[in-house]
Image (tube, grey):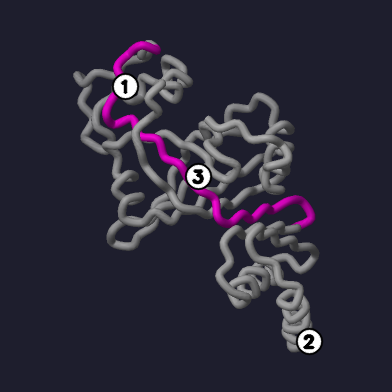
Amino acid sequence: MTAVMDGALPPWRQRLRGALKREGRQVSARWLQLATVTADGTPRVRTLVFRGWSGAAQLELYTDGRSSKTAELTHQSQVELCWLLSKAKQQYRLRGTAAQGAPAADQSQWRSLSPSGRALWGWPHPGQPFQSVAPFPQELPEDAPIPEHFIVVQISIQQVFVKVPLHLLYAWQYVLQHDFLMLQSFLHAFFVSPSFIFIFSPSVYHVGAFAGLFQVASRLFSMI
């Protein structure tokens, strides 16, 4: 994992950290939903466990390389995560690009799992018919050989939408190619929640674009 100074954290990471603190020691606070697309274009969604940060805007998940999920990520690396934090009453939608790879050479990711957590990678091939005689270990020790199908998924976050109480929607977008893309992103969030919206882009900031945006938004609302 990569240590990042507080000052280097993007604003949504600071808000997320505060929300996670409010969740306390709830196990469910680490659960998030990953949406993927199959080769035939149909959607899939699964619950995974948040494993940590490998960069200021890059999070890590672990998965079984034998599952269909890995093929889906190879087919389409663009994904979206949904992270609901019930005590904080906040929902985070994280869009980004997924990259699959082997664990670190120091085995820190494998060792970070509990013995029962490591055991999941010792179970039979996921998605296959159940066989009662198949091995289902309850635990795997820290020094157990790392299975080849233990895969680390790093997701580089490019867009963040945060839903908070009172139906406010915060939005951050990292990569903006031109003013129209900025306008399109802002209007989408603006119509969902006209009360408050904040867009953050470290690479592009055009005052003129925002001025024109409010003119367009005003005209659109006058026609409603």
Q: Quadrant of residue 219?
A: bottom right
Q: CA distance from mark 3 to mark 1?
A: 25 Å
Q: Look at the numbered disc 1 and give the secondary structure of its residue.
A: loop
Left/right placement of residue 31 relative to residue 46 reads right
- Pointer 1 or 2: first along the chain: 1
The residue that label 2 is drawn on is: 222
**Above or below 109: residue 153:** below
The residue that label 1 is drawn on is: 146
Kindly indicate whether the residue at mark 1 contacts the one at mark 3 (C-beta within 8 angstroms): no
Residue type pointed to by label 3: Gln
Q: Magenta stretch?
A: 142-167
Q: Residues within 10 Å of mark 2 (few under 14, many from 20)?
A: few
Nearer the observer, disc 3 or disc 1? 1
Locate residue 26, reporting x and y percent: 63, 27
- Pointer 3 or 1: first along the chain: 3
Locate residue 202, reporting x and y percent: 66, 57
Q: Quadrant of residue 203?
A: bottom right
Residue type pointed to by label 1: Ile
Q: Look at the numbered disc 3 and give the secondary structure of its residue.
A: strand
